[in-house]
């Protein structure tokens, strides 16, 4: 079948985006939306480009045009919801994300975003339901598997969390994350030796992930093994210098070892990084 001009322009713009030429993509999409103002996909892509360029107002306008052009566009409604998340407007974000799911209840990006909101609100049971749908629809989504396992563990469903982490072991890029999760399961069951072994294995498998290092350090800290805790925390700090939980653990360590001024500085850093 003959490819329409709107599809051609959309394809050219996406090639530009893939190559990192966002300005070139914007130019093509501005031309395309001028010629085909009723094409929701063009408006949605334009909004995404504006957002990546930091122009939030024009991004919002483009997403709104996408919804006007096609009220059933789950992608455009989800993108509006994500913008509200970034702005801290949680209620409006939930409204937009649920509207997206009303039009496509299997739209994975909306499910992921809504699950994240529920987790941050402490609604773990609601998050579990959403994340279970995500991993069923996208079995390769390592982050969703990990988030699901963590949510189940937070809900006290240790066996279900363990089963989820074991499923994650077989997914691409999943073993290190799964071992971190299984280490948390071992901790919940009081088996600190097994937990440490799993955290250390995860840290070796994924040197760029600070989570198993932070978890190892926390275990050492609880055991009063301060030198080992400090070594783990410092290694993690190189990857995530502004991580609040990590800084808090460091403050506790310095306080326990009598380094009160250093502990105070860590607390001040936490407050400064979370002033909003």
Image (cartoon, grey):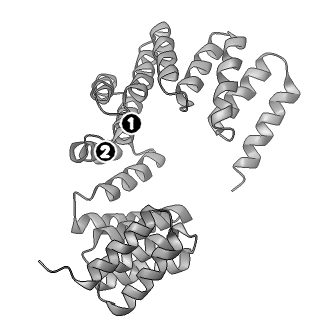
Q: Residue at x 83, y 33 (%)?
A: 264
Q: Between 16 and 166, which is closer to the camera in this rendering?
A: 16
Left or right position of 13 against 267: left
In the picture, residue 161 is in which quadrant? top left
Q: Position of residue 228 (x, y in %)?
A: 67, 12
Left or right position of 131 against 202: left
Quadrant assignment for the C terminus: bottom right
Q: Residue at x 49, y 61 (%)?
A: 85
The answer to whether mark 2 and mark 1 are in CB contact below 8 A is yes
Residue that numbered label 2 is attached to: 131
Q: Which mark is residue 169?
A: none
* Residue count near mark 2 (Cα–Cα under 10 Å), binned few <14, some 14–19, many ≥20: many
Above or below residue 109? Residue 252 is: above
The earlier-in-sequence mark between 2 and 1 is 2
In the picture, residue 252 is in which quadrant? top right
In the picture, residue 174 is in which quadrant? top left
Q: Position of residue 143 (x, y in %)?
A: 39, 40
Q: Farthest residue toward the top?
A: 193
Label 2 element class: helix
Q: Position of residue 226 (x, y in %)?
A: 71, 13
Residue that numbered label 1 is attached to: 151
Q: Residue at x 54, y 27 (%)?
A: 207
């Amino acid at each position: 079948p003959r490819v329409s001009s709107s599809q051609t322009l959309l394809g050219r713009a996406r090639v530009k985006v893939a190559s990192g030429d966002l300005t070139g993509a914007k130019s093509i999409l501005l031309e395309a939306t001028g010629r085909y103002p009723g094409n929701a996909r063009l408006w949605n892509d334009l909004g995404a480009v504006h957002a990546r360029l930091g122009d939030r107002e024009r991004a919002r306008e483009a997403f709104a045009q996408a919804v006007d052009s096609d009220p059933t566009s789950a992608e455009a409604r989800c993108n509006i919801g994500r913008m509200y998340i970034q702005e801290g407007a949680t209620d409006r974000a939930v409204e937009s994300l649920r509207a997206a799911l009303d039009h496509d209840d299997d739209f994975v990006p909306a499910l992921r975003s809504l699950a994240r909101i529920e987790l941050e609100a402490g609604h773990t049971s609601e998050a579990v339901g959403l994340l279970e749908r995500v991993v069923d629809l996208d079995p390769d989504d390592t982050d969703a598997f990990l988030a699901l396992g963590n949510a189940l563990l937070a809900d006290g469903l240790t066996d279900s969390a363990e089963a989820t982490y074991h499923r994650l072991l077989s997914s691409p890029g999943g073993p290190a994350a799964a071992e971190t999760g299984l280490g948390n399961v071992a901790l919940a069951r009081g088996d600190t030796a097994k937990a440490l072994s799993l955290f250390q294995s995860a840290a070796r498998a994924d040197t760029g992930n600070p989570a198993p290092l932070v978890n190892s350090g926390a275990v050492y800290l609880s055991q009063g093994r301060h030198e080992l805790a400090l070594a783990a925390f410092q290694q993690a700090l190189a990857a995530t210098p502004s991580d609040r939980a990590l800084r808090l653990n460091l403050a506790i360590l310095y306080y326990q070892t009598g380094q009160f001024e250093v502990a105070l500085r860590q607390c001040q850093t936490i407050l400064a990084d979370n002033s909003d």
